[in-house]
Image (cartoon, helix red, strand yellow):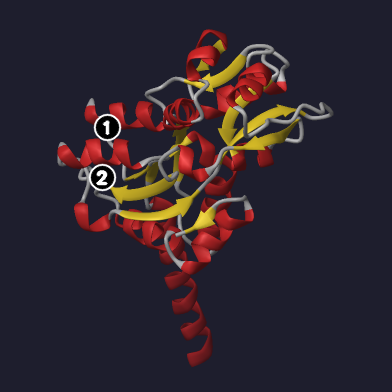
Amino acid sequence: MKYPVLLAMLAVGGVATGADAAQRAAPLVLAAASLQESMTAAADAWAAKGHVRPTISFAASSALARQVEAGATADLFVSADEDWMNELAKRRLIVPASRVTFLGNRLVVAAAAGTTVRIPSRPPAALARVLTAGPLAMADTPVPAGRYGQEALEALGVWKQVAPRVVRAENVRATLALVERGAAPLGIVYATDAKASTRVRIAGVFPASTHPAITYPIARLTTSRNPEAEAFRRFLTSRQGKAIFVRYGFSAR
């Protein structure tokens, strides 16, 4: 008689635990557009551990930061640069102790798959000639990828020649889409964006010395009240979490 009672108690306990898990709210993560595949994979891995799966909103880091400044409620912010995280820090919208820079990336020129164009590193005249052969897709300058791209072209001495041919996009993935659709023969994106698409290839890589280091900081927002948010942040910045992003072409920091 004791065993059926014990099994019944365990069954009831299991149901309660399952109900509690179902009632837990998913943490909301605001993540840079370039993290779409990798952050989705990380969220899936976290859910596979028995946690509620985070809800992720992808957009340009600039757009997400402005949403937070406007009062949007979220739990975590992952930026594609330090500047927008610094902006939120100045406004005391992040928890300072939670801020960690955990990923890196490279800046590249993407071309349609099947094309043969190559981006010369020098001399400037040759570089400008290739980049001005058609529209050059770039993200808007408030967007980290757009700012990195402009700074790289300025450092290489070709920005003045290239600027009139630039077609701006709202974020780095919109830039990639312009190249995929053939609306622009070339586009400046991150290496991970080019890797995520079968319709483009990398035609050239910008020297790291031509632009600030491309880094991804993460922090918990002061509006966060979800206990799962901090646990997920720790997972993302752990060795196991970083390994997921490395599979998608990011570097771990």
Residue 219 lies left or right of residue 189; in this view the side is left
The answer to whether residue 129 is above or below residue 112 is: above
Determine which of the numbered discs, if any, sits on residue 221 in the image.
Answer: 2
Q: Residue at x 23, y 38 (%)?
A: 88
For the C terminus, the quadrant is bottom left
Residue 182 place in picture, x, y as percent:
73, 16
Mark 1 in CB contact with mark 2 (< 8 angstroms): yes
Nearer to the camera, 62 or 152: 152
Nearer to the camera, 144 or 231: 144
Report, in whole angstroms, how far the alpha carbon at label 1 lies from the one at label 2: 9 Å
Can you see residue 236? yes
Q: Residue at x 57, y 48 (%)?
A: 38
Q: As shown in the figure, which amino acid type bears the numbered disc 1?
A: Val
Q: Residue at x 27, y 56 (%)?
A: 98
**Quadrant of the rendered image containing residue 109:** top right
In the rendered structure, which disc, 1 or 2, sits on the residue that comes first in sequence?
A: 1
Residue 206 lies left or right of residue 10; in this view the side is right
Q: Residues within 10 Å of mark 2 (few under 14, many from 20)?
A: many
Numbered circles on residues, count: 2
Determine which of the numbered discs, if any, sits on residue 215 in the image.
Answer: none
Q: Residues within 10 Å of mark 1 (few under 14, many from 20)?
A: some
Q: Secondary structure at mark 1?
A: helix
The answer to whether residue 27 is above or below residue 139 is: below
Nearer to the camera, 167 or 54: 167
Q: Secondary structure at mark 2?
A: loop
**Quadrant of the rendered image containing residue 183:** top right
Nearer to the camera, 206 or 193: 206
The answer to whether residue 41 is above or below residue 7 is: above
Q: Residue at x 67, y 15 (%)?
A: 184
Residue 201 place in picture, x, y as percent:
73, 35
The answer to whether residue 87 is above or below residue 38 is: above
| Residue named by callout 1 | 68
